[in-house]
Amino acid sequence: MAEIHLWGALRPAADGASVVSVDAKTIRELFRKLEDAYPGMAPHIARGVAVSIDGKIYRDSWQTELPEGAEIYLLPRIQGG
Amino acid sequence: MAEAVDLKVVGSRPVRPDGADKVTGRAQYGADINLPNMIYGRVLRSTVAHARIKSIDTSAAMKIPGVLAVVTGADFPQAESGEIGGEGGGDVADVAQNVMARHKVLYHGHAVAAVAAKSQSIAEAALAAIKVEYEKLPVVLDILEAMKPDAPLLNPNCFTKGLPEKQTKPSNIASVMTLARGNLDEGFAAADIIHESEHVIPMAHQGYIEPHACTATINETGQATVWLCTQGHFDTRAQTAKILGCSVADLRFIATEIGGGFGGKTVVYLEPVAILLARKSGRPVKMMMTREEVFRATGPTSGSIARIKVGVKKDGKITAAKCWIAMEAGAFAGAPCGPAAMAIFAPYTIENFKVEAFDVLNNKPKVAAYRAPGAPQSMHCMEVALNEVAHKLGMDPIDLRMVNAASEGTQAPYGPKFPVIGFKECLEAAKKHPNWTKPVPAGAGRGFAVGFWFNVGMQSSAEVHINDDGTVRVVEGSPDIGGSRASMCIMAAETLGVPYERVRALVGDTESTGFCNVTGGSRTTFATGMAVVRACEDVIAQCKNRAAATWGVDADQVEWKDGKVVPKPGVNADLKPLSLAEIAAKSARTGGPISGRASLNAQGAGASFACNIVDLAVDKETGKVDVLSFTAIQDAGRAIHPAYVEGQYQGGAAQGIGWALNEEYIYGKDGRLQNPGFLDYRIPVCSDLPMIDTQILEIPNPNHPYGVRGVGETSIVPPIAAIANAMSNAFGVRMTHVPMSPPRVLKALEAASKA
């Protein structure tokens, strides 16, 4: 069971929680289970959410695995100029 | 990942491959494309800042001899809503309306119609003959006014996002971004010193020298080919397809050379219009913006108002920090609030903080990305606040930052722990730099500030083809703005073990190479470079197989060493190593041409930090500021071509100096832009700038084969605050309104003398 830290815009969809627990082995599974448990997150996930795993930031990388005990944050995606 | 040790080509400074063509005028930019039977497109732009379009009468224009097509918003399909991506990118439906207004005009310069004619003068006459009837609406330009509940609404369907409760009343506040941690009250209560201030930065333009231009032609099967100056022909093709409701397969986009973009050439303005005009007229259509159009209707960056509060202990430790920042989006949502909020406190370890960032619509052009979007605006106020605090504490400003500096393992304010970063190394380098240790020139002031940017990865593709003489051709899909062709050649040469001179790079079009996202986000050397290295590794694997087959040994009995396939120790000492050229010469007999390719979504971009030291003098009679020296220190991760890296540092500094001292959009009360030209919107010229000293630090990003972090954006973040801090030190007055132009400096000096 991974602890997933949410940024502010996602928290209303999780009843204000800043951290939720999800049993997921990959980013794809994480997103699917978040959408099931918290439907309000679906539009954010559809638009694109970055995932930080132990400080390495992933973007659109569904197959990436979530290691046991990793620090996981969901973040807004940055593009830059 | 490849070990970045014993590098032979990475870190060298070969002559840029596009240099000769550019200095001799041979290089083809957006406006240089000419086709047989080509005609010219021009855009009619709104003369008012906010109005309903009651009618557009194009009949007189169409009767003018030589006019071959006219389009208005009615010719465009209704684009579906959807994210375009990127700061300032916004929603497809909004971008479609920005390309051509439908029922309302939202700023002075908004496109309302376009014509195509046999000459530019006929096109101009046709524009003059188009009659547009407007019903004027109240104009709102000021950020704070636009945020009021009773402000004139730009979009009645805009409801503030990012608040806990769903909003039911429309507002010009498109969204709110909030980041917080810890307990602010406790943090401020623990402080010995509290600093509070408000800072204004106006809307400013990227100031690229080449105006937007494109040429579109349609073939008999309806496929459009478009030549355009762009930061990303794949992304702008995708935007155009969505706006026109067609398939990307019906659009071929070819990137010309580009005269600057800085984020502003990541979205479309002319391309969908040119395609429609070409379809209607049956002729190739060239469109070129004037400089006035560039200012009135393309990508400025957000102006902002920021309120900062910082609490600090006597030893310099920050106990709490709070920022409220409102940023102009212009006519459509999309101010870079997210990165502004995420970047502001990123360099520091702060237990208690809160940032609120507001995306605010007003009757100005829709903003577009500009180098590190949002970070200069937000970090400016924090960097100014820290210098004020350092002054009150009698503490060296670099020491103050070092006390609070983030490092590997620090919990970044936007969430995760930082991996390896080089912020402390930047501060240490600054502290030792001769431009910091030397005495401040008499009558001058010295300023210091730091900057941060995330950098990104995203999608890239590359192909590496080996010619039969062993020379190498790299094909990438990233437009070369800051030296990508040279950097790709260097990384290919390093990986393949061949001299740089034996590698050539080409930017392919959307039909000839694999997908690449924009050249932006400081991503190209990182992500496309990673693709090139992977494609080279593909080539190496093929070469090993072919050499092994030639020798009649197993592939696992050979290895790649110094650009040659060699037998592993103990295999057969009589086998003579085979070079890339030798293997290529026999390629027809060993399986055909050797080509490697890679397509990837690059993960693990490395954040970068920078700091600036500036000395300046103020002429107290005229208010003119002379920058005496400017030093840019930044972590590149790895400098693939150090001269280009230095150029990025210097370019960011030059733009930051311009923004700090002179650049701003000036509007009349009627919402008309007063200074849409380089005479009145004053970017720095050579005589305004000293030689900008640079120092490259290399704290490698472990997620890139050669350690690249990306360098294109961080450099514009610290200059505004560094200059503001130098101004404060120069004459003891804190100026809180950028730009610190001569009239404002004189006013500040006058106020100081009265005080």
Image (cartoon, coloured by chain):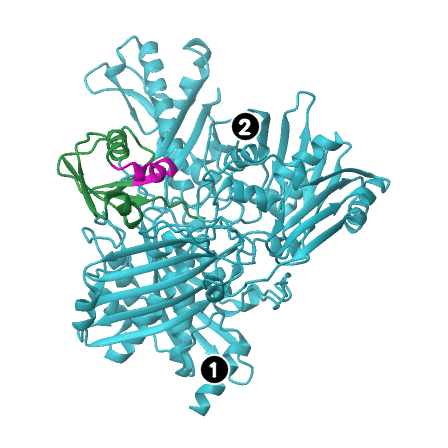
Instruction: Identify the image quadrant of residue B500.
Output: top left
Q: Is residue B480 above or below residue B197?
A: above
Please rate how many residues cluster around mark 2, counting C-alpha atoms within 10 Å: few if below 14, some from 14 to 19, many from 20. Answer: some
Q: Position of residue B510 (x, y in %)?
A: 53, 29
- Are marks 1 and 2 in one subunit? yes
Which residue type does callout 1 highlight? Answer: Ala
Q: Colour of chain A?
A: green
* Label drawn at residue B748: 1
Q: Quadrant of residue B6?
A: top left
Task: Based on the picture, tell me whether residue A47 belongs to the magenta stretch.
Answer: yes
Q: Position of residue B100 (x, y in %)?
A: 63, 44
Q: SS at mark 2? A: helix
Q: Quadrant of the N terminus of chain B?
A: top left
**Residue to which mark 2 is pinned:** B248
Q: Which chain is cyan?
A: B
Between B207 and B586, the one nearer to me in the picture: B207
Q: Quadrant of the C terminus of chain B?
A: bottom left
Residue B573 in sight from this viewpoint = no
Callout 1: residue from which chain?
A: B
Q: Main secondary structure of the magenta part?
A: helix
